[in-house]
Amino acid sequence: MGCHSSKNADARAVSGGFVSDEASAASSYGVNFSLSLMNITVDKAAKEKYANVAAGYKLTSLKLWSWNDTDLLDALSSAYTAAGLKKLEVMIMVPQDEVIAFADSAEKAKELLPILSRYHFVRSIAVGNEPDFPGGNPPQGKDLEIFQKLPMAVANVQAALQGSPPGSGIVVTVPFSNGVVGPNNGDWGDVIIKQANKKVVEACMPNLDFWAFNPYPYFSFEGVPMGVDKTTWQDWVLGNAKTPFGSPPLSSMLESQLYNMRHALDKLSKSAGSKQIAITETGWPTEPSAVGASIANARLFYQDMRRDLGRMTTTYNLVPGYVFLFELFDEAKKTGNPAEAHWGLLNQDGTPKLGLTEFVLPPSFSATKP
């Protein structure tokens, strides 16, 4: 397994991840593509509609939230062919509720092979999503069982890819939450993989082609530390600070999260420290009734991220192109915080969000701030 993982990760790094000449304005990132929590009937026609929207923006890097939705995969194939796009690379996901089945059965994992054989644009597989912190809480009950079985699920997926032509060059990861790490004995200058997560993380590592996690600076926007000026803090969280902030001084909260994750992997083991890092989700909501959420702030966050991404890719050994914005479309059925239904770069109906979309999605990306 280890040799397979290393070879594929190196190959992807050399190829530049999801970089595409046809969408050079957004070549350094992809987008999460999910329709399941829209308040519409998500039938075959709807999937075709939204696939055409993605192709219309020449988005050649997509992360899906399923692995076997053939209607959606067919829709993407047709839309991109019709648009004359030669490049499409997709990450599929084994959802949380299927992790146990993949862990308990090597044959179940082999069901991925017909998908890989039929859809050559599928190039990577995510197993689970934030299994260390499901729903924003440490795993308990069934979620804990899923977390504990995660290493076997990842191992079975890798085993299914071995020696099989459809599996050649396919890379595998687990998108962990940013909460997988924490301060060592309360010291935020020494961030480590939390003890409760360490055993599972270590068991997964040999079969991960790269490390992946979901950093969300937005959730720190209102958490102004005592003695820190509020404007200074919030500008830094957005990536818009006039000068670096923190210890060590860094350009943004996002960079701080990357710095801490790299430090934690280095501390875990030499092998873990050598892993490249992917960002499988990050974003900023636009619903103005939620604190800190707005079109203007989302635009700043994405533009500042783009400004720093090349440097951060080199500094923290990121997988080029494996930064997935969350998400392409609003999903109106999401509940909880008012912001939850409004993370999209586009409205739920696929129309642009004026003042955001044209600055983030190709071909209109602009690094110029308002």
Image: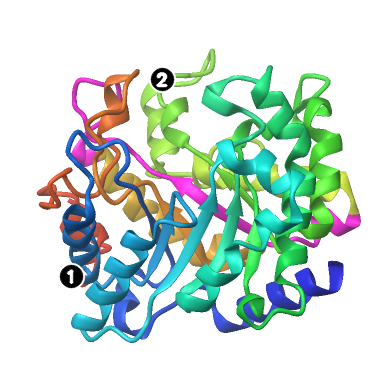
- Dot 2 falls on a residue whose secondary structure is loop
- Say which amino acid is labelled 2: Glu
Compared with 328, 234 (above or below) is above
Measuring from the top left, give residue 78's x and y in whole percent. 25, 76
Label whose residue precedes the other's in the sequence (1 or 2): 1
- Start-end of magenta stretch: 270-296
Q: Is residue 290 left or right of residue 355?
A: right
Query: Pointer 1: what residue?
Result: 56
Query: Is 58 on the left or on the right of 114, as rendered?
Result: left
Q: Nearer the viewer, residue 202 or 274?
A: 202
Residue lying furthest right in this view? 270
- Viewer-nearest of discs 1 and 2: 1
Q: Is residue 142 visible?
A: yes
Most foreground residue, 293 or 61? 61
**Image: 117 above or below 247:** below
Provide residue 53's location: percent of width, then percent of height: 18, 62
> Residue 234 in the image: x percent, y percent?
39, 30
The image quarter containing residue 162 is bottom right
Residue at the image position 60 percent from the left and 61 percent from the top: 111
Local crowd size for mark 2, using a 10 Å CA cut-off: few (<14), some (14–19), many (≥20):
few
Mark 1: amino acid: Gly
Task: Say which element carries label 1.
Answer: helix
Q: Relative to the observer, which residue lies in front, 335 or 316?
A: 335
Give the residue drawn at x 26%, y 58%. Answer: 360
Q: Residue 201 location, x and y as percent?
A: 79, 42
Q: Which residue is mark 2?
A: 222
Give the alpha-carbon distance from disc 1 to disc 2, as whole Å. 36 Å
Query: In the rendered structure, does residue 169 fall within the stretch colored magenta?
Result: no
Q: Residue at x 34, y 51 (%)?
A: 302
Vertical arrangement, residue 322 with respect to residue 214, above or below: below
Quarter the N terminus occupies = bottom right
